[in-house]
Amino acid sequence: MNVTETSAEGLKRELTITVPANEVEDKITRRLGEIAQSIRLPGFRPGKVPLPLLRKRYGPAVRGEVLESAVQDSSAEAMREHKLRPALPPRVEIVSAAEGADLEYKMSVEVLPEMPEPDFSSLGLEKLIVDVPEEDIDRAVERMAEGQRKSESVERPAEEGDILVADVVGRIGDEEIAGSRGEGRQIELGAAGLLPGFTDQLKGVGAGETREVRVTFPEDYGNPDMAGKEGVFEVAVKEVRQRLPASIDDELAKAVGLDTLAELRQEIRQRLQRDYAGLARQRLKRGLLDKLAERYDFAVPPGMVEMEFNSIWAQYEADKARRNEVAGEVGGAEAPQAQASIDAAAIIAPEETALEGASEQAPASAEAEKPQQPEHAPAAHRARSRRGSAEEPVDAAAIVAPEETALEGASDSEPAAAGDEDDDKAKADFQRIAERRVRLGLLLAEVGRNNNITVSQEELNQALTQEARRLPGYERQVVDYYRKNPEALNNLRAPIFEDKVVDFIVELAKPDERKVTPQELMTDDPTDGESAPAA
């Protein structure tokens, strides 16, 4: 085999590789000999079929198989000899492969850059610590008690705060509003989220009465077919119920599966502590990634950046299309009707609508049989996660997990935020974001490789179990899907690996600890815009 490097520009390499004709022929002959041991042809005993006959019958197919194998083997050997670490699978262009002639082809490959040796001891990170204030627990208990408030039927006219149980139907002119008809709807007088004046017209109504409620839909109403028009709702009241005072005692705890109010408060404290700790870790991780992005600037493979950009741009366009559809700009004749159904239900009973919406989250069986990739996952996550050998391309951008994306701000994690901007400006922004993601992914991958950080099978099994629990009733289908699709399984491995690398770096960085209030923790860092190139 002869290898000649014809171009070395940046991270791109081009090689011309020649495999002598006699080597190709030897491989073809050996393969035909293997076939001869098992093939059965009429008139010949097993293993006695003449080679010329085998070559005539199977020669073209065997030659194609051998040429493909020769390209794979020789390209891997060429990269080893030249100490190339491919970032993506190489592109091959056959120059000559005629029978009896040398196999000659050109190989183009993007290689991983020379990585800096990072010093994590002087990153200047800060870890925020939050103690759960008692007043936060008090507010949480009060909200829970409010949600558990019971009601009782009363024989009097309805007042502010009462709940009407009523049959409802709404019309605009002579046409019934789609989705407005309902029996036994619950309407809370004075509840937020209803059209202005709707519940005011129901004050004083009693059980057994029917009232017509007239409302005017706002000019900027979501459904243009209803905007600015007058609607008439016929409300037949079956019952008037008054809310009982909120009860904060052991009975409240028992209503949510605990024994005492003290246990409930402790459960809330632990939950809030977990939430605050998770948010503090996100802030710490965001600070770490920003510091790394500031400190380490090196060339990245253009092909990897292009893949990541294409993923971001596809998400951006999908989000834009969804926004247009919601606004009634896309979707045809069915869109206004669907919007009318949703909005009319919200006018009558927002709590009921929320409960009905929960059922929509249940997966259809067809979807559960083949779980879909999360829409927010970067392209790198949807690609194969390979690390570390010269023979195999490494998709190091797969190391950057969705959390990193989510912490980079709206201009990165939420491409839809730029929906009103000019596409050219959006593309320039997303190009910078893609380059940042790839660079951080490469850096984290290298840190993990150099420090033997791996994801154990137990950790992967735990992630798979958590993923399966997201679809109750379809756990087996989810597990089977991931086990049959190594690429999907790598999507679970990548964020675990990233978190382990981040934890490793944080331990070396020894961040300073600072106690803050929950409000301070949840306030955006004013330096975010300066420290994050992607933003």
Image (cartoon, rainbow, N blue to C red):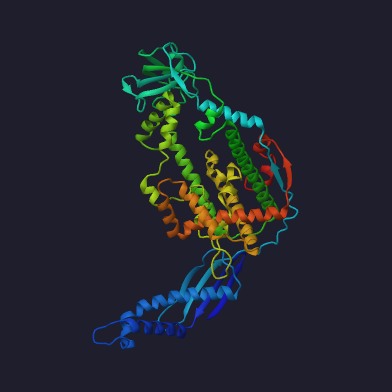
Q: Residue furthest left?
A: 43
Write the residue at 41% across / 33% down.
356
Residue 158 drawn at (x, y percent): 44, 13
Horizontal and vertical percent for residue 240? 42, 16
> Which quadrant of the structure image shows residue 321?
top left
Camera-nearest residue between 285 and 178: 285
Above or below residue 253? Residue 80 is below
In the image, residue 65 above or below residue 388: below
Displayed quadrant of residue 121? bottom right
Q: Look at 33% across and 81% down and name the residue there.
A: 38
Q: Residue furthest front?
A: 259
From the top left corner, tell me how far across and down residue 128 is, in percent.
Answer: 69, 42
Relative to 403, 515 lies left or right: right
Name above or below for residue 530 compared with residue 453.
above
Residue 60 shows in this picture: yes
Q: Where is residue 472 in the image (x, y as percent from the top left)?
A: 43, 45
Q: In this view, does 311 lie above or below 457?
A: above
- Give the quarter of the figure containing the C terminus: top right
Would residue 365 appear left or right of 119 to someone viewing this image? left
Picture quadrant where residue 52 is located: bottom left
Q: In this orientation, does residue 421 appear? A: no
